[in-house]
Amino acid sequence: MAPAFYSIARGSAMECKAIVDAFAVLQLALEDTPRQAMEFLTRIVEMLTRLCRRGDPPRESAPESTTTTTTTTTP
């Protein structure tokens, strides 16, 4: 289930990169802010991409449970 969440987060980060790019083109941000934001978002997208590729880590198998039945007698 986690890879699905990582994929959604990755898409959101890529949308953020597009918004930052638009701000830079429209000159709505300070000079260094878009560059710093793009570097940060690029690292986030790379991290999320690796997490998506990795998939769910293997889980330790739980020990087989033994079913015990207890019976009670009423006098």
Image (spheres, rainbow, N blue to C red):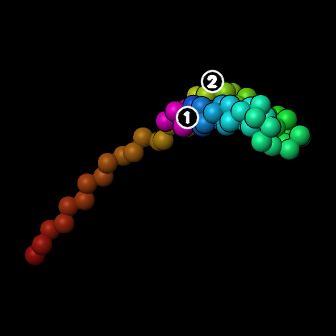
The amino acid sitting under disc 1 is Ile
Residue, x 48% and y 41% (percent of image)?
Answer: 62
Residue at the front extreme of this rendering:
26
State whether the magenta stretch is mostly helix, strand or loop.
Answer: helix
Residue, x 39% and y 45% (percent of image)?
Answer: 65
Secondary structure under tag 1 reads helix
Q: Residue 37: x, y in percent?
A: 80, 39
Residue at the bottom extreme of this rendering:
75
Secondary structure under tag 2 reads helix
Q: Is residue 41 visible?
A: no
Query: Does label 2 or label 1 sit earlier along the sequence?
Result: 1
Magenta segment: does it hold 65?
A: no
Residue 33 drawn above or below residue 52: below
The image quadrant of residue 58 is: top right
- In front of the other: 37 or 43: 37
Report how far apart the C-alphas of labels 2 and 1 lie in the structure: 13 Å
Residue, x 30% and y 52% (percent of image)?
Answer: 68
Say few, some or many: other residues with alpha carbon within 10 Å of mark 2 (under 14 / 14 to 19 / 20 or more).
few
- In front of the other: 53 or 69: 53
Q: Which residue is mark 1?
A: 8
Residue, x 52% and y 33% (percent of image)?
Answer: 4
Residue at the left extreme of this rendering:
75
Q: What range is drawn magenta here?
A: 1-5
Q: Is residue 49 visible?
A: yes
Q: Residue 3: x, y in percent?
A: 55, 32
Q: Residue 11: x, y in percent?
A: 60, 31
Which marked residue is nearer to the observer: mark 2 or mark 1?
1
Q: Is residue 27 left or right of residue 51?
A: right
The amino acid sitting under disc 2 is Arg
Q: Which residue is mark 2?
A: 53
